[in-house]
């Protein structure tokens, strides 16, 4: 695909602005941050006037509505402390989220999760391979390219909702994992 001409860009910009006007300011911000994240672009840091509607008790790594954080220098240890996972499987989901959004590593191997777990100063998982596989069965992770894994969309929503257990549970309740089909025992 070739580069757009300035006149094409002006047309696209006009359409985007017109479409964004129909949204509430919080939705506009969330959408712009999501687009920037999708394209790997940095967004300017929020000024105090932009955050005056956000309660002070809200952690910056988990803004209202589950948007992406502006704070990119949070350590994995702080991130895990904020999210408060209760099991190895939940911790794997949080570490996968951290790798994706804070380390720009959307595809990772089990060893990457294990190393990040150590960096986050968390207790060693009894079997990290089992925890990663169980995170996949739960729907937090999905296969990616060449034997790697990636966090699933429902997994991202789950982690964003943490530490609010009810919201996190509700997010995963909306997702029904695909069941493997069984071949009929009777061949006709």
Image (spheres, rainbow, N blue to C red):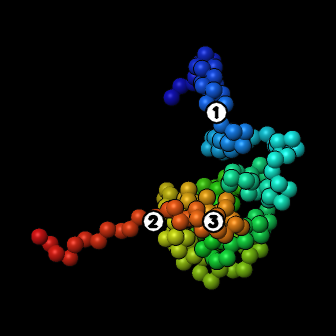
Residue at horizontal 11 percent and vertical 70 percent from the top: 188
Q: Residues within 10 Å of mark 3 (few under 14, many from 20)?
A: some
Counting labels gives 3
Q: Nearer the viewer, residue 13 or 110?
A: 13
Q: Nearer the viewer, residue 104 or 97?
A: 97
Disc 2/disc 1 C-alpha distance (Å): 34 Å
Q: Earlier in the sequence, mark 2 or mark 3?
A: 3
In the rendered image of this protein, does residue 48 appear above or below residue 148?
above
- Does 82 sit left or right of 95 as displayed? right
The nearer-to-camera label among 2 and 3 is 3
Q: Earlier in the sequence, mark 1 or mark 3?
A: 1
Residue at horizontal 81 percent and vertical 47 percent from the top: 53
The nearer-to-camera label among 1 and 3 is 1
In the rendered image of this protein, does residue 37 appear above or below residue 152?
above
In the rendered image of this protein, does residue 136 appear above or below residue 12?
below
Q: Nearer the viewer, residue 22 or 148?
A: 22
Please tell me in which quadrant of the rendered image residue 167 appears: bottom right
Q: Secondary structure at mark 1?
A: loop
Q: Secondary structure at mark 2?
A: loop
Disc 1/disc 3 C-alpha distance (Å): 29 Å
Residue at horizontal 49 percent and vertical 56 percent from the top: 145
Is residue 36 something one can see in this rendering?
no
Q: Are marks 1 and 3 in contact (CB under 8 Å)?
A: no
- Image coordinates of residue 24 in percent, x first then y, are 69, 39
Q: Nearer the viewer, residue 126 or 164?
A: 164
Residue at horizontal 79 percent and vertical 55 percent from the top: 60
Return the residue at label 2.
Answer: 177
């Amino acid at each position: 695909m070739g580069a757009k001409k300035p006149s094409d860009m002006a047309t696209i910009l006009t359409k985007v602005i017109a479409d964004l006007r129909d949204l509430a300011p919080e939705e506009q911000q969330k959408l712009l941050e999501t687009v920037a994240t999708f394209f790997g672009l940095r967004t300017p840091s929020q000024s105090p006037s932009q955050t005056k509607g956000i309660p002070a008790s809200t952690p910056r790594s988990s803004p209202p509505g589950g948007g992406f954080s502006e704070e990119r220098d949070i350590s994995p240890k702080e991130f895990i402390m904020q999210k408060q996972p209760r099991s190895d499987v939940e911790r794997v989901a949080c570490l996968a989220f951290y790798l994706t959004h804070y380390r720009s590593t959307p595809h990772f191997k089990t060893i990457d999760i294990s190393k990040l777990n150590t960096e986050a100063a968390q207790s060693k998982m009894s079997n990290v391979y089992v925890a990663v596989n169980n995170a996949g069965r739960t729907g937090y992770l999905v296969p990616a390219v060449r034997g790697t894994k990636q966090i699933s969309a429902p997994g991202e929503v789950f982690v964003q909702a943490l530490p609010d257990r009810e919201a996190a549970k509700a997010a995963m309740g909306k997702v029904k994992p695909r069941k493997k089909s069984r071949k009929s025992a009777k061949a006709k």
